Image (cartoon, rainbow, N blue to C red):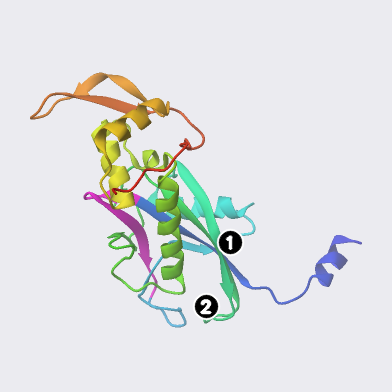
C-alpha cells in the first residue's frame, strides 16, 4: 500500500501526547522536585498553577519518548541528567480539558541544583515533605509525583540511585545523608560504610576534606552506565 494511502487509512482521532518529567535534587538538606508555573493566558488549562516540567511530543525533533524527556529536561534546567528512568503512562478523557490525552512520565536525578541563570524563568524547586509538595499541581501531576517518590524510595532500598544526586566529590557521611534524606530515616553508620565500600561503586581521591574535626576521605562515583544493585535492602530500625 502506498504511504499516502496508508496515512489515509490511519485518519482517526488521536489523543494529545505529552511527556512529563519528575526531576529530583538535594537542596538545603532536603529532597526537592522541580516544578514550572503554567501560563495564565486565555484558553490555557490550569492557568498560573504549578506543574511538572514537560510538554507535547515534537514528531520532528523527538525520535522517541526518551528523546522528548531529555529535551524538555534540558530546556527547563540547562543540564542533562545522569539518570533518567521511565516511570509510567497516564491517560484519560478527563485529565486535560483540551481533550483525550496521554502522558508518559519519566523521573530524573540531578547531582546539583541548577542556578537561576541555568533553569527556565518559570521553574522553581519545591521541598518534598511527607511525600508531598506544598502547591496543588495541575492535571494529574500530583498522582504522578506520588508515584515517582514511591518508585525512588523503593529503589533506593536496594540500589545506588542516590549516588546520582551527589556532587563530583563527597565523603561517605555525605552519601549516607543523601540516602537518609530520600528514605526519610536514619541508617546505621558502620553497616552503610561497609556496603558502599564493598559495592565497588565509589573510589577514593588522593586528598582529604579539611574541617573543624579530623580530615575526611573524599570519594567520587566510578564511571558506570547503570546503578549498582544490592543483595538485600537497608533494614529499617527495629
In front: 41, or 136? 136
- Mark 2–mark 1 Cα distance, whole angstroms, equals 16 Å
What's the magenta region? 25-39
Secondary element type, mark 2: loop
Label for residue 98? none
Q: Can you give x and y, in whole percent of width and height, for residue 119 in the image?
A: 35, 53
Q: Which residue lies furthest to the front in this view?
A: 238
User: In this rendering, does residue 13 appear at all?
Assistant: yes
User: In this rendering, does residue 170 appear at all?
Assistant: no
Residue receiving disc 2: 96
Would you call the spot at circle 1 few (<14 residues within 10 Å), some (14-19), or many (20 or more)?
A: many
Q: Pointers 2 and 1 in contact (CB under 8 A)?
A: no
Question: In the rendered image, which quarter is residue 126 located in?
Answer: bottom left
Residue at 59 percent of width and 55 percent of height: 65
Q: In the rendered view, would you say 97 is above or below 194?
A: below
Q: In the rendered view, would you say 81 is above or below 105?
A: above
Specify whether 5 is left or right of 58: right
Q: Please state, as top left, top right, bottom left or bottom right, where the N terminus lies in the image.
A: bottom right
**Earlier residue among tags 2 and 1:** 1
Residue receiving disc 1: 57
User: Can residue 35 be found in the magenta stretch?
Assistant: yes
Amino acid at each position: 500500500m502506498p504511504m499516502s494511502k496508508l496515512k489515509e487509512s490511519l485518519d482517526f482521532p488521536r489523543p494529545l501526547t505529552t511527556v512529563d518529567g519528575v526531576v529530583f535534587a538535594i537542596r538545603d538538606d532536603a529532597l526537592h522536585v522541580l516544578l514550572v508555573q503554567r501560563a495564565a493566558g486565555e484558553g490555557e488549562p490550569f492557568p498560573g498553577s504549578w506543574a511538572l516540567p514537560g510538554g507535547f511530543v515534537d514528531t520532528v525533533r523527538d525520535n522517541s519518548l526518551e528523546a522528548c524527556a531529555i529535551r524538555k529536561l534540558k530546556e527547563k534546567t540547562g543540564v542533562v541528567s545522569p539518570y533518567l528512568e521511565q516511570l509510567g503512562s497516564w491517560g484519560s478523557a478527563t485529565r486535560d480539558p483540551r481533550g483525550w490525552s496521554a502522558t508518559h512520565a519519566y523521573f530524573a536525578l540531578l547531582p546539583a541544583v541548577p542556578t537561576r541563570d541555568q533553569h527556565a524563568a518559570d521553574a522553581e524547586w519545591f521541598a518534598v515533605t511527607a511525600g508531598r509538595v506544598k502547591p496543588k499541581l495541575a492535571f494529574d501531576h500530583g498522582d504522578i509525583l506520588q508515584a515517582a517518590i514511591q518508585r525512588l524510595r523503593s529503589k533506593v532500598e536496594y540500589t545506588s540511585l542516590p549516588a546520582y544526586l551527589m556532587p563530583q566529590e563527597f565523603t561517605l557521611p555525605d552519601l549516607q545523608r543523601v540516602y537518609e534524606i530520600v528514605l526519610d530515616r536514619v541508617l546505621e553508620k558502620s553497616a552503610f560504610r561497609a556496603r558502599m565500600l564493598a559495592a565497588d561503586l565509589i573510589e577514593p581521591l588522593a586528598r582529604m576534606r579539611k574541617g573543624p574535626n579530623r580530615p575526611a576521605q573524599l570519594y567520587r562515583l566510578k564511571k558506570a552506565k547503570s546503578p549498582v544493585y544490592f543483595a538485600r535492602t537497608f533494614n529499617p530500625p527495629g
